[in-house]
Image: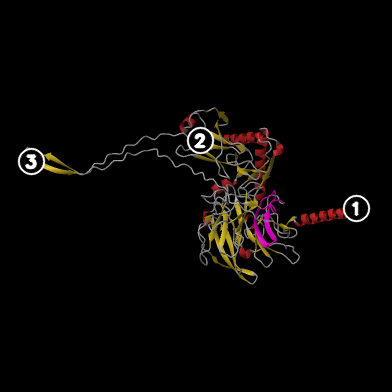
Amino acid sequence: MKKNKQLFLKASGLVLLAFCLQLSAKAQELRSLSGANSPNDDTNPVWIGNNTLLFTRAFHPQNLGGVSDSGDIWETKKDETGEWGKAIPRPDLSTAGYDLVLGLEDVLTLLILRKEGDQTSVHQFSKFGTDWNYLRKVNFPDLNSFEGPVTGRVAEGGKLIFLAGKRQGGFGNEDIYLSEKTGIVEWSELKNLGPAINGFGQEVGPFYDPVAKKLYFSSNSYPGANGKDIFISKRLRESWDSWSKPEVWQQISSRGSEASITFISKDEVVWTSTQNSDGYADLMTFSTPVPLVIPIEFSAPITVSSEPEKPKPTRRPIQANESASRTVILPLSDSTEVSLKLPPITPIANEIPEVESPVTWLVIDGKNKVELPYTLTFINGAEIVDYQGTQLVSELKNRSINLIKISSAGYFPKQVLVENLDFNTKTIVLLIKAELGSTVLLEDVNFKRGTAELEGESTEASLSDLAIFLKENPQIKIRINGHTDNAGDPGLNKQLSLERAGSVRNFLIDKGVNFENLRISGWGGTRPVASNATEAGRAKNRRVELAVEQ
């Protein structure tokens, strides 16, 4: 009888454990803010209290600029039952350009970032009851140095603004920068947060907790990222470029791309994700508020500095000292002489003719900045050339070698044009490791204008190299992502981008790559990496990228 009782208690315990696990799984279940989301991009949620969430909605018919408007401010509210109401537009906070909420500078002041044409600016709005009235434009330097979209957030307390975007001199596509408030409407110049935060890829959607000194941001530069995931880094010292090694926030990261978190309480958070949509961002949260599992262990990053060698001088001037003034006596006749003072004579410096030096290489891991072993393959058009000679640019050109492929085991290969080589400095090549979360731009892949037809010898050579690499590494599964600029019909752009990704996949399959290892997506013009206001920016946005998914 006692034995039977023990068995009953054990069985009851197992049932209770299963029930608790079921409740835990249900509590962790993710859901979209159904009342707030739309078929469009819904991004950058900002909690401003009073049960109110503001966010940016792109290309919606109710935007001030209609379906061509890249972002207006919208609002949704949370009721007493925890349900989110239907989103409504806020034309009082929006323009026909791109509008993004930065957050509360103080309880009565809201900051909005605007991009109209090629001009980016920040504006203050003052609260009056439940309305926001326009106050003024603030003095914010450097904003127009960004190329393309900008994301960011005011840190709690209103003294700091973190912005993410692409600028010259950065570490990757988009980097995170900091500006500090110096007056009522004055902000300091932007400071890059440094290589501990900013990697080779995209760092966007920053959110800083000044109490915990933790920076939350979205990135595809770090190991383990699927698309873009949320990472957390802790400030280590007083300087703004001293950060811990970023840790992925596993609790909310998915196989989609996550970005732009906002805290509603210590146990409730809203963010954006593409995991349940057709490439467009949705606002996400947990079905039931649960304790947030935020990493607590942070370590200092390991960085290796690899500075290029200084150029060696190719001309050596011979130093010459000026001679002293001389007096020359010239005879005018047998009995008459005249003294004539001559100016100093400066010898002409001799020059040694310029001597061509062999090309030298520095191949490094694009993320960890460590030097890599490598091999070189010399290419003429689509043909490999057996070249063993000294790597002089002139000699390479004489052999009709126009491309050099740089390879390292486990890394995506890269090609360099011979015409871009410089024998005065080391040629630095960044290689991307083929690991989960890595993203690689297919720089040399081109299409005939307005079509999905591949074009050019460089395209064939680049994709052929990629096919060889993928066949040598059959365990790697990749997603081929097609992108366009924002000109024309969004639906047609998305279809074209998908067809271009399909053309790349078909080429690789024809070269022997396993079909099961290749997936495709078409994003149209929804994920620009540069401004669509210029032809140069639009050209950068028309691209194909690879993302490692396994």
At label 3, the amino acid type is: Thr
Q: Which residue is mark 2?
A: 418
At label 2, the amino acid type is: Val
Comes first in the chain, label 1 or label 3:
1
Q: Is residue 240 visible?
A: yes
Q: Residue at x 13, y 40 (%)?
A: 329
Q: Are marks 2 and 1 in contact (CB under 8 Å)?
A: no
Is residue 536 a member of the stretch shown in magenta?
no
How far apart are labels 1 and 3 at the CA level?
143 Å
How far apart are labels 3 and 2 at the CA level?
72 Å
Q: Which residues are magenta?
A: 249-275
**Considering the numbered disc 3 on the image, is that residue within a helix, a strand or a loop?**
loop
How far apart are labels 2 and 1 at the CA level?
82 Å
**Percent x, y for residue 331?**
11, 39
Q: Is residue 535 visible?
A: no
Q: Is residue 204 left or right of residue 285?
A: left
Q: Nearer the viewer, mark 2 or mark 1?
A: 1
**Percent x, y for residue 304?**
54, 45
**Percent x, y for residue 166?**
55, 51
Q: Nearer the viewer, mark 1 or mark 3?
A: 1
| Vertical position of residue 159 compared to residue 493: above or below | below
At label 1, the amino acid type is: Lys
Q: How many C-alpha atoms fall within 10 Å of the one at disc 1: few (<14), some, or many (≥20)?
A: few
Which quadrant holds residue 328?
top left
**Considering the numbered disc 1 on the image, is that residue within a helix, a strand or a loop?**
helix
Checking the image for residue 336, the label placed there is: 3
Q: Are marks 1 and 3 in contact (CB under 8 Å)?
A: no
**Percent x, y for residue 256?**
69, 49
Is residue 250 a member of the stretch shown in magenta?
yes
Q: Is residue 545 left or right of residue 15?
A: left
Q: Which residue is mark 1?
A: 3
**Considering the numbered disc 2 on the image, is that residue within a helix, a strand or a loop?**
helix
